[in-house]
Image (cartoon, helix red, strand yellow):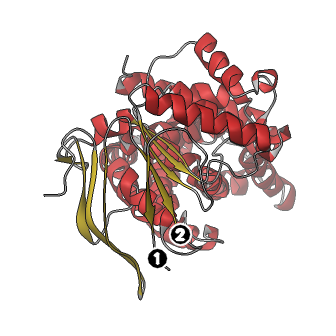
Amino acid sequence: MNMAVDGLGVEKVHVWRGDRHVLQGVSLTLRPRELLHVSGPNGSGKTTLLRVVCGLLRPEQGRVSWLGQSISSVRAEYQAALAYASHEPALKGDLTALENLRFAVGLKRRVSAGELRASLERTGVAACADLPARVLSAGQRRRVAMARVLAMSASLWLLDEPFTNLDAAGTNLVSGLLQSHVEQGGAALVVAHHDLKIAVAMRRLELGP
Amino acid sequence: MSVGALEAFALVVRRELCLSFRRPDQLLQPLVFFLIVTTLFPLGLSLQLSLLRDMAPGVLWVAALLSSLLSLDSLFKSDADDGTLEQLALCGQGLTVIVVAKTFAHWLVTGAALVLASPVVGTALGIPGSAFPTMMLSLGLGTLTLSWLGAIGAGLTVGLKRGNVLLSLIVLPLAMPLLIFGAGATDRAISGTPAAGALYFLAALCVFTCTLAPFAATVALRITLE
């Protein structure tokens, strides 16, 4: 049995998009203190896999489990434990960075404005807290999205291309955040098309074209 | 500490209202449309008050239906386009709570606003003051029902590029009973006959959609999210 009873398990997942067999029996496990780097060429199904793992997309075949149980049967617990960052920063342009965080994180857990400001500080965008998201640069928006992941204090991070639009300092920052998350007992699944430079034990899953 | 469903509901309503008030042009569009269409009729028709009064319920309700439809398209679309809908779907609260909160907030800024503006329009159309309570109650029930029907349509068409035409085609036929009974109730109130029958029917439709539409809209939205 390829199942992680203390973490995330994906077993022989198949997804078709029309005639295209996007995911052909993908299996993986992810336990606490592990980082899994999913890579592959464009169109290989990296984002599709991430959406299946989140539970946003139901696979035609196969199973995704959390702590040994199917994610559809423990949906609330699973969603409370995960933080997902899609390749879009998912911010409302008319709300400030802080409001964006408050409305997104506030649905998961009770959180104070101080905590939210602290997570914006950790991602280096504390100065943008009270600016509308639409005036932020693409890199700043990515950092705010990362601050949202931090503020959710989730044990499982599911990140889709978290380094897009980031400068060298931003890339190092996100790498550092991933490292400390894994070292503190968290798990992370990162979709990225380039190599990750993170000083933790890392496994790699290469998806074919 | 986890967040309860009621708390999540309140937070999403606040988020929606906050977003609406940051965009006053979009917020006022349905209301302005309603006011313009209804006040054009007295100018366009002859100055016979009796004719205006006969037409008032129909004009009022057609304008209310169309102006509510104007804003339905954006109910889930902007959240789907910028990726925030996925975040809402994964917030651990269940999508139904989010759908209920968003639809309720949508009604507050469109339907409730129309209800509050309706006495002005009623006066312009020559509706007597004694008919205002029935007119406002019927509009309140009707617009709330319409928001729920619209939530199903908006959920089904959220993935389409220009879904607003399809949305109108889905929602308008379902809204016909509202138009018939809503205009009927207002008409009876103007003529001074009891309007309770039509109001009960509107209330029944409202309860029916309020209880079932959240689940239908959630399923529709989940399908389009995939």
- Residue type, label 2: Gly
- B198 and A63: which is toward the camera: A63
- Residue type, label 1: Gly
Quadrant of residue B161 within the rendered picture:
bottom right
Identity of the residue drawn at 38% across and 28% down: A185
Q: Quadrant of the N terminus of chain A?
A: bottom left
Q: Identify the chain of the residue marked 1, using the numbered disc in the image.
A: A
Decide: few, some or many residues near mark 1? Use Cα within 10 Å; few <14, some 14-19, many ≥20. Answer: some
- Check the image and name the residue furthest to the left: A1
- B40 and B208: which is toward the camera: B208
> Is disc 2 placed on a helix, strand or loop?
loop
- A152 and A33: which is toward the camera: A33
Mark 2 and mark 1: span between their CA atoms? 6 Å
Tag 2 and tag 1 share a subunit:
yes
List the residue tagged with mark 1. A208
Quadrant of residue B58 within the rendered picture:
bottom right
Q: Is residue B202 visible?
A: yes
C-beta proximity under 8 Å, tags 2 and 1: yes
List the residue tagged with mark 2. A40
